[in-house]
Image (cartoon, rainbow, N blue to C red):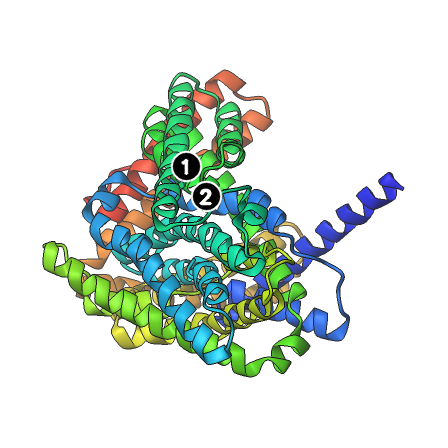
Amino acid sequence: MNMENFLGTETLIIELLLIVSLVALVVRRLRIPYTVALVVVGLLITFQQPQKISLTPELILSLFIPPLVFEAAFHLEFKSLRENWLPIVGLAIPGVLLTTAMVGAIVSWGVGISLTSGLVFGALIAATDPVAVVALFKALGAPKRLTTLVESESLFNDGTAIVVFKLMLVIALSATVGNTEDAHGGGSFNLLTATVDFVRVSAGGLLVGVGLGWIIAQIIARVDDYLIETILTTVLAFGTYLVAERFHVSGVLAVVAAGIITGNVGLKGMSPTTRIVLFNFWEVLAFVANSLVFLLIGLDVNLREIGANIFPIGVALFAVLLSRALVVYGLTFLTNLRTANKVPLGFRHVLFWGGLRGAISLALALSLPAALAERELLLVMTFGVVLFTLLAQGTTMQLLMRRLGIGQPEKLELEYERRHGRLLAAQAALRRVNEMHTGNTLSLTTWEEIEPELRKQVAHANAAQTALLEEHPDLQTEEREDAILEGLRAQRAALAQMLSSGMISDAVYEELIEEVDGRISQAHRAAVEGAEPQTI
């Protein structure tokens, strides 16, 4: 029976990953956020045939959240955090507290539930999930600072929201049972105790993450094996969460701190090859975890319950949007008064509309105990708000950014990419037809008919690109960057081929591949910083 359960689970995972792959292929053409498409597919599957899949809070928080949080924190730079610390801290701490209070009060009054239950809902819905937005940022080439603000706020407010949620839940259960001893193991609730607990849990989680992150970073600095270093970061991401939770401090904040420390301290001791392998590994792991979470969200939502509770969901959504507007515009206005590095108005619009809710909010809602009187209503409202933010805000973010002129490549650069793409496509077609001819899979007559036309297309595309470069010499820098990176990638592929054919040994391959990877890293860094590109 155990083997049957194992095979059933394995089959389900394979089926989900297959769906994930198919959706990823389709959305490339539809130009909609990938995570939104996964939720829609999950909803369609559930609508056609109800699923028995259950999203437990333990599954989301302990299995899916660590890789998502660690991967995002791993790419945050100390410099960017230091330059933007004031708005980030403002949105992540006072912002969460204000959101909890405003949403709690509005929902309590509008829906007719107790204030304590309203505050619980306000806390669990305060955690933002920027995954769909950040993926769109990458596609549109959004400014790095905007990406840092959105990701950093989400990383830190996730941890803060979880801490506040647990404290609010104590209050709600105290009011429900009339005795905090049943809810929290003894003692009566008071503001001072709650404040001390908030500081202890938050600071404790950060300290655990910094400590474990620093230890792993020191080990990585002394090891030059990308397999071992990749395993160590994996152990760190999941292990930090478990250790922090064991000590009853914030596991999410611990993973955030560990990821930031490893990404800034540990990377200095890594070879270029390890750095590339590590980035690719965590990108894949985060992609899989994120894809499964959003697909499971769609599979777990009960559309009939949402339809039967439109009014309370509408009130909750109004409260969430209103509080988000007041928090973003109000707090950034105040932080702009205290710093020279101000948050532009366009960025504030994106921060407001990009405050999507997702996995963390659902995990917290699912963890609500049965003893809480309004548990089912809070759960339905959470699902409704999450669906709206993903389906409405997630799909219109691209339109908003275009209206604001944020992240759009220059028309000239787009024209260069267009002409460069046509040239590469024409050259690929010519190479393939010539291969078919030399391999005797294409008749001489057909080849003589097709080959001149393809050469004409290549010549035309090459002339168009050359004319654009001559008219706008600044574009030659971009062309040179493309050429350098393609040349380095060709070198890497040639070394791999020589290794597989036995022309070079493993030791020589590792030595040479590290040299090439070092130049690839330098080329990427030069492109990001706008520096003069190196030579191959």
State which quadrant residue 178 falls in: bottom right
Residue 317 in sight from this viewpoint:
no
Residue 110: assigned label: none
In screen coordinates, is 515 left or right of 470? right
In screen coordinates, is 54 left or right of 428? right
Circle 1 packing at 10 Å, graded few (<14), some (14-19), many (20+), is many
| Residue positioned most to the right | 1
Residue drawn at (53%, 67%) of the image: 382
The quadrant of the image that shows the N terminus is top right
Name the amino acid type tagged 1: Gly
Q: Position of residue 24 (x, y in %)?
A: 57, 61
Residue drawn at (34%, 37%) of the image: 521
Q: Using the image as rendered, state which of residue 181 and residue 80 is in the foreground.
A: 181
Q: Which residue is mark 2?
A: 252
In screen coordinates, is 333 left or right of 71? left
Q: Which residue is mark 1?
A: 205
Q: Position of residue 108 (x, y in %)?
A: 46, 73
The reply to whether callout 2 and callout 1 are in contact (CB within 8 Å) is yes
Q: Position of residue 81 (x, y in %)?
A: 25, 45
Q: Position of residue 473 (x, y in %)?
A: 17, 59
* On screen, residue 280 above or below 416: above
Q: Using the image as rendered, state which of residue 369 and residue 459 is in the foreground.
A: 369
